[in-house]
Amino acid sequence: MPFRDISGHRPLLELLGRATARGTLPPSLIFAGPEGVGKRLTATALAQVLNCERPVEYGRPTSDVRRPTSEYGRPKTEDGKHEAGKDACGECAQCKRIARGVHADVLAIEPGDSGSIKLEQVREAIDRAAYRPFEGRRRLVVVDPADALVDVAQEALLKTLEEPPPASVFVLITSRPDVLLPTVRSRCQRLRFGPLSPGEVADLLIREHGVEPAEARAAAAAADGSVGRALEASAEDANDARDAAVRLLQSTATSADPRRRLDGAKALVAGGGDRDEVSRRLLALSSLVRDMGLLQSRADDRALANADLKPQLQSWLRSFDGDRTIKAFATVDEALSALDRNASPKIVADWLALNI
Ligand SMILES: [Zn+2]
């Protein structure tokens, strides 16, 4: 993903684009900032622009002279125009191989099972970095997260960070730069990634992760500028929503007793009956009902959204024939529209439990 497609961090990305265009990129970098804001993506974009066969111009228009030139060190060329930065095309063979994670000159050093990055891993990367790049122009060694480096591994890196092999760039990614040895920190140029704005997080969730807009906005609001955290939260919410939907189906599938059915409704409004939360649970319910319909039509398992619950879905089918399933689907839909029209979540949940 080239710089231009990364959300947020505009000044920092432009800085990298200009340094690349001018050939002044420091060879040892620390990308510091919160988890899940795009540090690793930026390292990949940097690898791409350093190796791209058809780089493109990047940065604000050259006629934009209102900003002070001192900001982020924007240089002017001799004729007074701002110098353009460089960005990867994203299309050439180099860009594509880097995006797929199969480029021989982009090395990722990551923690093994122990959770830490060991001396041997660092030694091996240093050895490989000593050779000329195999298929590209520049090699990028990404250590992610750098705070997982054991102390001896950090010490082993010192000399290389001080004077990397000519074609190599080292990027140390971390949300906790202060955990790194001071000697490591002092040999690297530190770039600080700030949190993303809630709008940027929501856009990313919608665009890159297919999250529904309402859910994306809710997750972004609570994620404190981190896409990683928003995704985690939305996965947690999704699990929670599905659990509630499963409980409702369990208590309504086989029982005509209104009291038992209303117990199922409680699962839908558990935790206070927040409108967004109840909507999420209804959407999960709708997805389960849809899967029951698919099973009735003997669709392929791969079509199921909840394939892991297949045995349970099949057991409910004993009480949900085709007609009841279709009616249930419509009932959930009606409940969702009622919520949208500001009906009380508790009343909607009770009505649904009695009618599904
Ligand atoms: Zn390219």
Image (spheres, rainbow, N blue to C red):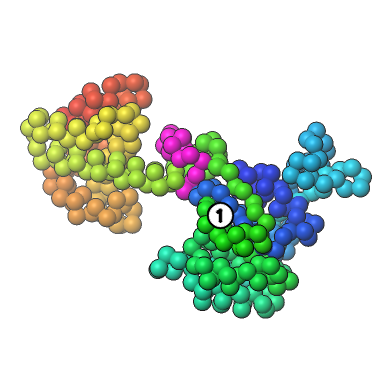
Q: How far across and how far down the image is residue 214, in percent?
A: 43, 34
Left of 16 or right of it: where is 290? Answer: left
Q: Amino acid at mark 1?
A: Pro
Question: What residue is rendered at 44% in x and 46% in y?
Answer: 229
Q: Quadrant of residue 62?
A: top right
- Residue 83 visible in image: yes
Q: Quadrant of the N terminus?
A: bottom right
Graded by Cα atoms within 10 Å as few (under 14), some (14 to 19) or many (20 or more), the crowding at tag 1 reads: many
**Regarding mark 1 in the picture, which secondary structure is present there?**
helix
Q: How far across and how far down the image is residue 282, in percent?
A: 29, 35
How many numbered marks are there? 1
Left of 139 or right of it: where is 234? Answer: left
Front-most of 131 and 304? 131
- Residue 168 visible in image: no
Q: Is residue 278 magenta?
A: no
Left of 3 or right of it: where is 312? Answer: left
Q: Residue furthest right?
A: 79
Left of 265 or right of it: where is 173? Answer: right
Q: Residue furthest front?
A: 182
Residue carrying label 1: 177
Question: What is the magenta range?
Answer: 212-228
Question: What residue is rendered at 78% in x and 35% in y?
Answer: 67
Front-most of 294 and 283? 283
